[in-house]
């Protein structure tokens, strides 16, 4: 089974995600770059029926560290 891919574009105040399902369908969302935003991401993924993803995040200084460590 192929895991869906989650692309993450991170910035100081927010992060944009693009979920690519195995079927190729794309879904986009924007979340605040805070602990609350990380929880909102997990809730959104759960609502999409996603249990595991292959996540790819750009390296933008330290902006993505908290999100990377929260997983």
Image: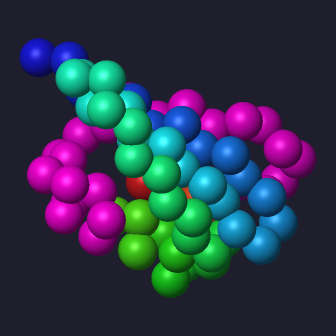
Furthest residue in direction front, as rendered: 25
Q: Is residue 8 above or below residue 13?
A: above
Q: What residue is rendered at 50% in x and 82% in y?
A: 36
Tally the marks: 0
Left or right: 51 with respect to 43?
Answer: left
- Tell me where residue 43 sits by quadrant: bottom left
Name the residue nearer the viewer: 49 or 35.
49
Which part of the image, by quadrant, shows the C terminus? bottom left
Whole-percent x, y for residue 32 in the image: 63, 75
Residue 15 at least partly seen:
yes
Residue name at image x 39 percent, y 47 percent = 27
Q: Is residue 4 visible?
A: no
Q: Residue furthest bottom?
A: 36
Choose between 22 and 1: the one closer to the eye: 22
Residue 40 sits above or below residue 60 on the image? below
Read off the magenta span.
43-65
Q: Is residue 6 magenta?
A: no
């Amino acid at each position: 089974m192929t895991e869906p891919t989650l692309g993450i574009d991170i910035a100081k105040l927010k992060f944009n995600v693009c979920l690519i399902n195995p079927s190729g369908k794309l879904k986009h969302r924007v979340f605040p770059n805070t602990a609350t935003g990380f929880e909102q991401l997990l809730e959104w993924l759960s609502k999409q029926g996603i249990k595991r993803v292959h996540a790819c995040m750009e390296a933008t200084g330290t902006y993505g560290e908290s999100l990377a460590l929260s997983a």
